[in-house]
Amino acid sequence: MYSFSHPSAGQRRRFLLVGGSYVVLWIAIWHTAGLLDQNSVSLWYLPAGLRFCCLLLFGWRGLLLELLANMACGLLQIPIPTDLPAAFLSAQPHWLIYGWFAPVFAYAVVLLPWRRLKHDALDFARPADVALFILAALAASTLAASAGTFRLAHVGFIPQAQWPEVLANWLIGDFIGIIVLAPFLMVRVWPGLQHYLQTGHWAHFRKPRNGNGDSDLHTVLIAVSALLLVFGIPWSWGLNTHFPLIALLLLLPLAGLALRHGLRSAVLAAALLDCGLVMLIALYGQFGLALQYQIVMIAIALVGLWLGGAVDAHKRITLRYRDFASISNDLLWEADAAGRLSEASGRLAQDAALSPGQYWRDLLSASSQPQLMALEHALSEQQLFHHQEVLLKGAGDSPIWVKINGLPLRDDSGRLTGYRGTAVDITRSRRAEAVLHNYNEELLREVAERTRELAQSNSELATKELHLQVLLAAAPVGVLELDDAQCCRFINVNGCAMIGYAQEEAQGRPVLDFVLPDDHDYVEFVLKINRQNDAVHWLEFRLARTGLRCSAHCLNLGGSDKPDQPMSGMIMVLTNATARSQQDERLWTLAHYDALTDLPNRILFWDRVEQALRHAKRLDSGAAMLWIDLDGFKGVNDHLGHAVGDALLQQVAQRLKGRIRDSDTLARMGGDEFAVIMPGITASESASHVATELVASLAEPFDLPQGTAHISGSIGVGLYPQHADSVESLTQCADMAMYSAKTSGKNQVQVWKD
């Protein structure tokens, strides 16, 4: 069925050309049918076949062509009246127009809905399509014959009594015309015509696969010969009355052509045979046997159509399975019951140099055949065998591995007549399997070696781990492992003793839980700034539970060479630094404090003075220095002894310390000299007041174990920045003021004066 969706200008021109040719052909066939129509007997009506094809293939466009062709034929068979308007207003022209259009619309009523409902093309190789075609032909013929006979009877062309006979003749003639001409046109003409309408070129169809390209010539020769034999011999023998029965013999060559060449040859032969019957009947004038001949013509057309379609369907199935077999297999073979090859086709037939008559054992290679026994068992038991792998000799020196399948063939009595089967070349897969097998063996050996090495490594690792555990347990230091969140992941026994936690209690705790709260900020800061540091870093802090001071050496684990990658943990080695810290504090105290009075010594005093002056300078403030020298101390020390002198110095230190502020620094400068630095003092009166109190305090008696001692003190006062702007100059001013107090009578205070 032809589709006219969005036709091009060229397609429209070609359709108009085909339409014009169709009208001319229709008129010619109609005229020929009229010549053969004798005594109101129409053996067949070929224009019915044209009409059927035109409407089925072209739809409503075909309807227009049919109406045009019928009008042309109608106008050709009537004379033109002198008074044309009056003639068309009479009753007879209306019936004439009815006669032109009614059969066409009768066909359209059947074919246009069928065309709309049937989306795929009509295929005579499908029995259902053939049945629908015959039913449609019968329905269209019946409607057209009824409409035409009604017109003939109404206008008086035929008597009412002949109406059924004319109806039957019309119906049979149209039906024969459809079933003879329509399949011929649709099978042999329409494919090329459709290609021409679409592309502008007539299609060139390929020859059949069996290589027989002369099927049309054979068909014509056989059909003509059959007609001559069927009609010639009986005519010469005087068997004219038996012609219809003898004509049935034409079914034999028709069946042979259909079986040999298929549907294309069958529809051609049916058309030739029916056409020959019509011409011979007209030649011999046997119109009295028209009905019998029509039955023969129907039989020829239907047998050719059914048998040709069945043969084509069988060929399609055969070709389909043959294509599947050739695509999926490299060899198709058959052998007789004795094991001799009778047929072989496919690529392997050439590669293995297979030829009919060869015994199957002669085709096998002398190499090892692992599955040969299974194949021989299946053959001896006359059983089906699948996927048996055998090695063929091959055309060259290299053998061919094939996977063979075989099906036993039996005759009607069940006796084995041979085998039929397929084979697939598996040489490449066998080679690949061999390579893979060797590779697997090599891989297994390598895996075994690696497994042995891994087992040895694991054993060594387990031994080292055991040694490490022993070392960690016996190490005199604490070992702590932290995770990314700085929580305890592992701690050894000594570490637990240092932090005061059991191992189970310490697991999962943040490291800051082990640190004294006063040191939290310091520890957190040090760990944070060294988070990406790959070097060992050190910090010292006090532990919360035990109060011990520990020294920690830390090392980040992983990610140290990538600054943007967070650490994956940390190792922290803890050592007890309490004794060392205490020793350091003692040494510092000895270096900066007087051992007798426990006061800052000269070194620490100068440092405090520098701090006081810097602070005063920064705040625009002042400071005062008091230089104290004891009066009468030498006499007590000489008369009562050095022990009494030392005790006296200790009481002096306590008495002076009790009279000054916490922010002031009192130091023993050596012998019986003391000094005080007082930050924040700007007026000399404030410094003099404190110095006066100190002098009064020193004048009070000192109770010693050996008795009461009386001493006094002379104090010199120097002010910053009034008197001096440096430590040395301020000390000199205070010292000179102290000497001035001594020379002025002792037991007094003197402020430095320029």
Image: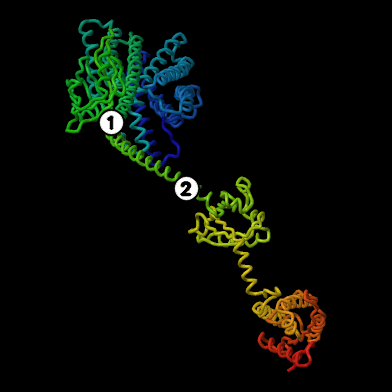
Q: Secondary structure at mark 2?
A: helix
Nearest the eye: 617 or 412: 617
Residue 80 at least partly seen: no
Splitting the image into 4 quarters, where does residue 579 fall?
A: bottom right
In-image side of 338 versus 167 (left or right):
left
Nearest the eye: 257 or 395: 395
Observer-side mark, 1 or 2, equals: 2
754 versus 82 height, above or below = below
Q: Residue at x 71, y 75 (%)?
A: 597
Residue 134 location (% of width, % of height): 41, 18
Badge count: 2
Which of the image's four quarters has the C terminus?
Answer: bottom right
Numbered circle sitting on residue 467: 2
Residue found farthest to the bottom: 754
Nearest the eye: 295 or 360: 360
Tell me which label, 1 or 2, sits earlier in the chain: 1
Q: Secondary structure at mark 1?
A: loop
In-image side of 666 versus 562 (left or right):
right
Residue 726 location (% of width, % of height): 67, 86
Q: Residues within 10 Å of mark 1 (few under 14, many from 20)?
A: some
Residue type beneath disc 2: His
Residue 295 location (% of width, % of height): 35, 11
In-image side of 71 versus 753 (left or right):
left
Read off the residue under disc 1.
Answer: 426
In-image side of 488 versus 326 (left or right):
right
Which of the image's four quarters has the N terminus?
Answer: top left
Q: Residue at x 50, y 22 (%)?
A: 91
Q: Residues within 10 Å of mark 2 (few under 14, many from 20)?
A: few
Residue type beneath disc 1: Ile
